[in-house]
Image (spheres, rainbow, N blue to C red):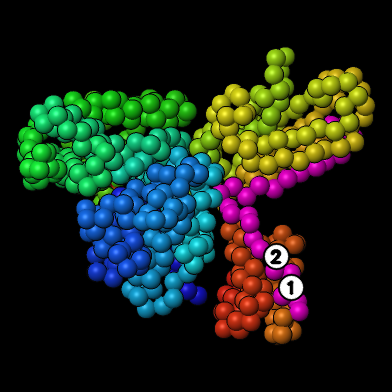
C-alpha cells in the first residue's frame, strides 16, 4: 500500500512528514529544504511558482504573488493574482500539489494519501475547503487532524508513560489555538480546544508596519500604504525586525529608496526597540487570554492543575509570549517538541496509525472534542430562530446525546429538524449543516406531542441526527459528514464500462461490507473511497488505476474479515 503522509499546511510555512522505521521523519522539498514558504505566484511567462520561488519574486511582482492564503479559507473571498482571481482553495491546492510532487520524489513512489492538519478552531466549512484543496491536488484526504492535537501526539509518542494535563499553545503565522489534553498511560484525551483564526505572527508584522508607515508619513508627508512595492518591502522588513527583536533589544529597519519624492529616492530608516514593539502589540497579546480562559472554564480545571504548557508555532519564539504565559498561568512554558515540525510529525504519526504502521503496543490512542456546539433550531415565545444545543462544545467524541422537544403549533403533523453548528443563541448566525422532516405526528394541541432528537458524533466526523415521535415510535434521520466534501460525481455508469466484468466481484464484496455495517469506523470510509476510485477508473478506462484500487480494496477487506 502506498504511504500516507502528514501535512502541516500553515499560513506562513508548510511542512510534510512520513512515519517510517518507527518514527516520524520530515520530508524534504525539491530544494532539499524542510520548510516550504506557503506562497504561490505566477511568473512573467504565466507559469505557476510555489514555495521559495514564489516568495523570491514577491518583492518584484507583489501583484503576482499570494501569501497567507490560509487565513482566507472558507471566507468566500477571491484572491487576485496577475490578471485573474482565484478561490483560496485553488491556491492552497497549488501548494499541496507541490507537496505531493516533492513527497513522491523523496519517497520514490507516487504519494496520493494524506492526513492534513487544520487549526482546532477551524469550522466545518473551513475543514471542507481544506479537504477540497487536497482533492484538487490529487490527494485522498484520509483525515483532517487538529494542529494542537497533532503536536500533542508528537509529544505523546516520546512521553508514553506520562500522566498529566498538558496545554498546547500554538501561535503560528496566521492562527492561534489552545488545546488542553489529558495524557494517561498512552491515551491522549483532548479535553477542550479554543482559539482565534484571525490571530498570528502576521498581525504582529502588521502592527509594526502600521507604525513604520505612520512615522514615515509624519517625517516625509507621504503615505506608503497604497504603494504595492513599498508595501511588500515594508512587510518583509517588518517581519525581519520582529524576528530580530526576539533575540536582541533594538533593530534598525532600513529600506533604501522605498519610494521617490519629487524625483528623489527616499529611504525608510527607523530604529525599533523591543519595548516599543511590545507596546505596539499589547492588544494582540491580550487577545490570547480569552481562548485560554475558555478551555480552563470548559474543563473546570484550575491553572495550577495544568502540569505542562507546550509551545508550538514560530510566533512562540517571541519572549513576550513566554513571559505572558508564565504570568497568566503561573507556570513557565516548555519547548519539548520542535515548534516548527511538531504538527507535521504528529500528522505523520496519525498517518502511521491509519496505515497500521504504529505498533499498537506503543499504545498511542487518541480521543478528541468537538470545538463547536451542535444543535437544532427551535422556537421560543419571541422568535423561531433559537439554537437549542444538543452536543455542547468541547464534548469528548465519540458521543451520543438526546434532547426532547414538543410540537410548537396545534394539529402539527410534521416537524422540520434543522441542524446547526456554532455558539450563537440565534441560529441565523451559526453554520447550517442540514435538515430533514419527521412526519406522521398525531394531530394534537400544541406541545402535546413530544419528539426525541438524538445526535451521535464519531471521531471520523460522522454526525447522525435522529428524530423520533415519542407516542408512535415513528423515526427519521440524516447523516452529516462533518468536514467531508460531499459533492462526489455519480459513478453508477461503471457497470457498462468495458472492464467492468473483471472487477464486479470485488465491488460487490466491498459494497456488501459497507451495507452490512461490519467495517469499523475509519475502514468504512476508506473502503467507500476506494470503491469510488475504482468505479471512477473503470469509467475513465484506466485499468492501471482500477487494478491499484482493487489491490488496496482487497487488502482493506482482508483486514476486517480476518478479525
Ligand atoms: N524568532 C522568531 N520570533 C518571532 N516570530 C517568529 C520567529 N520565527 C518565526 N516567527 C514567526 O512565526 C510565524 C510562522 O510560524 P509557523 O510556521 O509556525 O506558522 P504556520 O504554521 O505557517 O501558521 P499557522 O499555524 O498559523 O497556520 C511567522 O509569522 C514568523 O514571522
Ligand atoms: Mg502552524
| SS under mark 2 | loop
At horizontal 69% and vertical 48% (from top left) the residue drawn is 479
Q: Is residue 560 above or below residue 539?
A: above
Q: Is residue 235 above or below residue 425?
A: below
In-image side of 182 versus 479 (left or right): left
Question: Is the CB of the residue bearing disc 1 within 8 angstroms of ligand 1?
Answer: no
Query: Can I make out residue 319 in this image?
Result: yes
Give 99 or 71, whichever is nearer the viewer: 71
Residue 513 badge: none
- How far across and down, in percent of the image, does residue 229 sit? 22, 47
Give 522 or 175, whichever is nearer the viewer: 175
- How far across and down, in percent of the image, does residue 467 sit? 77, 37
Badge 2: few (under 14), some or many (20 or more) residues near its Cα, within 10 Å? few
Asked if marks 2 and 1 touch (Cβ < 8 Å), the reply is yes
Q: How many marks?
A: 2
Per the rendered image, the range of residues in magenta is 470-496
Q: Is residue 413 above or below residue 340?
A: above
Badge 1: few (under 14), some or many (20 or more) residues near its Cα, within 10 Å? few
- How far across and down, in percent of the image, does residue 205 sit? 23, 38
Determine which residue is flagged by label 2.
490
Name the residue furthest right.
443
Name the residue furthest top.
381
In-image side of 160 versus 538 (left or right): left
At horizontal 47% and vertical 74% (from top left) the residue drawn is 2
At horizontal 42% and vertical 30% (from top left) the residue drawn is 295
Q: Is residue 257 above or below residue 221?
A: below
Displayed quadrant of residue 451 = top right
Q: CA distance from mark 2 to mark 1?
A: 8 Å
Residue 493 badge: 1
Q: Magenta stretch containing residue 320, yes or no? A: no
Q: Quadrant of the C terminus?
A: bottom right
Amino acid at each position: 500500500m502506498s504511504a500516507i503522509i502528514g501535512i502541516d499546511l500553515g499560513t506562513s510555512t508548510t511542512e510534510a512528514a512520513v512515519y517510517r522505521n518507527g518514527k516520524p521523519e520530515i520530508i524534504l522539498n525539491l530544494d532539499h529544504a524542510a520548510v516550504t514558504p506557503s506562497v504561490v505566484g505566477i511568473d512573467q511567462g504565466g507559469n505557476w511558482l510555489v514555495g521559495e520561488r514564489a516568495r523570491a519574486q514577491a518583492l518584484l511582482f507583489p501583484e503576482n504573488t499570494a501569501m497567507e492564503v490560509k487565513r482566507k479559507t472558507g471566507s468566500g473571498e477571491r484572491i487576485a493574482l496577475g490578471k485573474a482571481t482565484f478561490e483560496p482553495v485553488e491556491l492552497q491546492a497549488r501548494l499541496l500539489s507541490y507537496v505531493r510532487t516533492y513527497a513522491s520524489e523523496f519517497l520514490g513512489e507516487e504519494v496520493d494519501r494524506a492526513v492534513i492538519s487544520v487549526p482546532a478552531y477551524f469550522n466545518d466549512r473551513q475543514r471542507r475547503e481544506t479537504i477540497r484543496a487536497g482533492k484538487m491536488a490529487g490527494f485522498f484526504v484520509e483525515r483532517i487532524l487538529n494542529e494542537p492535537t497533532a503536536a500533542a501526539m508528537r509529544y505523546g509518542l516520546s512521553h508514553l508513560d506520562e500522566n498529566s494535563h498538558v496545554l498546547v499553545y500554538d501561535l503560528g503565522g496566521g492562527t492561534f489555538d489552545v488545546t488542553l489534553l489529558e495524557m494517561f498511560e498512552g491515551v491522549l484525551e483532548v479535553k477542550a480546544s479554543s482559539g482565534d483564526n484571525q490571530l498570528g505572527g502576521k498581525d504582529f508584522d502588521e502592527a509594526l508596519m502600521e507604525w513604520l508607515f505612520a512615522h514615515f508619513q509624519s517625517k516625509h508627508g507621504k503615505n506608503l500604504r497604497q504603494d504595492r512595492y513599498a508595501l511588500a518591502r515594508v512587510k518583509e522588513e517588518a517581519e525581519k525586525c520582529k524576528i530580530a527583536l526576539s533575540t536582541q533589544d533594538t533593530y534598525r529597519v532600513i529600506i533604501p529608496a522605498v519610494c521617490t519624492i519629487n524625483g528623489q529616492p527616499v529611504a525608510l530608516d527607523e530604529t525599533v526597540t523591543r519595548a516599543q514593539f511590545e507596546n505596539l502589540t499589547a492588544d494582540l497579546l491580550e487577545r490570547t487570554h480569552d481562548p485560554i480562559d475558555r478551555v480552563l472554564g470548559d474543563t473546570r480545571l484550575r491553572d495550577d492543575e495544568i502540569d505542562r504548557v507546550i509551545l508550538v508555532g514560530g510566533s512562540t519564539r517571541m519572549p513576550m509570549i513566554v513571559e505572558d504565559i508564565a504570568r497568566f498561568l503561573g507556570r513557565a512554558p516548555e519547548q519539548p517538541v520542535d515548534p516548527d515540525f511538531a504538527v507535521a510529525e504528529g500528522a505523520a504519526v496519525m498517518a502511521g496509525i491509519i496505515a497500521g504502521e504504529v505498533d499498537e503496543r506503543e499504545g498511542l490512542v487518541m480521543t478528541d472534542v468537538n470545538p463547536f456546539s451542535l444543535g437544532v433550531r427551535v422556537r421560543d415565545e419571541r422568535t423561531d430562530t433559537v439554537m437549542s444545543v444538543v452536543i455542547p462544545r468541547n464534548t469528548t467524541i465519540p458521543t451520543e446525546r438526546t434532547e426532547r422537544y414538543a410540537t410548537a403549533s396545534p394539529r402539527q403533523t410534521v416537524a422540520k429538524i434543522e441542524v446547526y453548528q456554532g455558539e450563537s443563541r440565534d441560529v441565523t448566525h451559526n453554520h447550517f449543516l442540514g435538515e430533514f422532516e419527521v412526519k406522521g405526528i398525531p394531530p394534537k394541541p400544541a406541545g402535546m406531542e413530544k419528539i426525541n432528537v438524538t445526535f451521535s458524533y464519531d471521531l471520523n466526523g460522522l454526525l447522525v441526527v435522529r428524530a423520533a415521535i415519542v407516542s408512535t415510535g415513528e423515526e427519521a434521520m440524516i447523516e452529516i459528514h462533518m468536514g467531508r466534501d460531499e459533492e462526489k460525481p455519480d459513478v453508477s455508469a461503471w457497470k457498462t464500462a468495458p472492464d467492468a466484468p473483471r472487477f464486479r466481484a470485488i465491488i460487490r464484496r466491498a459494497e456488501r461490507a459497507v451495507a452490512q455495517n461490519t467495517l469499523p469506523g475509519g475502514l468504512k470510509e476508506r473502503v467507500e473511497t476506494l470503491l469510488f476510485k475504482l468505479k471512477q477508473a473503470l469509467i475513465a478506462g484506466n485499468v492501471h488505476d482500477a487494478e491499484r484500487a482493487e489491490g488496496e480494496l482487497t487488502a482493506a477487506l482482508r483486514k476486517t474479515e480476518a478479525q
